[in-house]
Amino acid sequence: MAGTRSTAYDVVLFGATGFTGGLTAQQLAEHAPGDLRWAIAGRNPAKLERVRKGLAGLGAAGSNVDVLTADVTDPSSLRALAEQTSVVATTVGPFVEYGEPLVAACADTGTDYADLTGESEFV
């Protein structure tokens, strides 16, 4: 259960460089409390850095976001990501193709998992 272990982040948003992930990052930056410990994550550090810079002026949480890299094709990177946070929120889809490795990493590390899938095959 989240909250029973010490983690660097409250929330990690995985897939922040995609369309929906970018919108989700903006919402977090604008509306989350300034003391939220959070990070954006994805495959490409340069794209993530551009997203991070774009969040800086949006709200209290926008100035306090870190960048992490992980790839759905690299289970060890997903496990390392999951170990650092209480919750992973992911927008990386299609989930039936890319979702299972992250779910497994979260289950293995006791990290809460949230996605926005509408894919009945994945649920």
Image: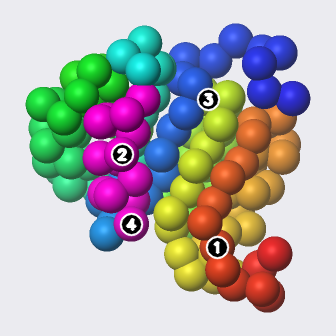
The residue sitting at 23% across, 23% down in the picture is 63
Amino acid type at image mark 2: Gln
Q: Which mark is residue 109?
A: none
Q: Do tag 4 and tag 2 residues touch (Cβ < 8 Å)?
A: no
- The quadrant in which the N terminus is found is top right
Amino acid type at image mark 3: Thr
| Mark 4 vs 2, N-terminal side | 4
Q: Position of residue 31 (x, y in %)?
A: 37, 34
| Mark 3 vs 4, N-terminal side | 4
In three-dimensional space, the C-alpha distance between marks 3 and 1, rounded to whole angstroms, equals 21 Å
**Relative to 52, does residue 102 appear above or below in the rendering?**
below
Q: Position of residue 18 (x, y in %)?
A: 33, 67
Q: Secondary structure at mark 2?
A: helix
Residue at which label 2 appears: 27
In three-dimensional space, the C-alpha distance between marks 4 and 1, rounded to whole angstroms, equals 12 Å
In three-dimensional space, the C-alpha distance between marks 2 and 3, rounded to whole angstroms, equals 19 Å
Q: Position of residue 88 (x, y in %)?
A: 61, 44
**Relative to 5, does residue 15 appear above or below in the rendering?**
below
In three-dimensional space, the C-alpha distance between marks 4 and 2, rounded to whole angstroms, equals 11 Å
Can you see residue 74? no
The residue sitting at 43% across, 12% down in the picture is 35
Q: Secondary structure at mark 3?
A: strand
Q: Which mark is residue 85?
A: 3
Q: Do tag 3 and tag 1 residues touch (Cβ < 8 Å)?
A: no
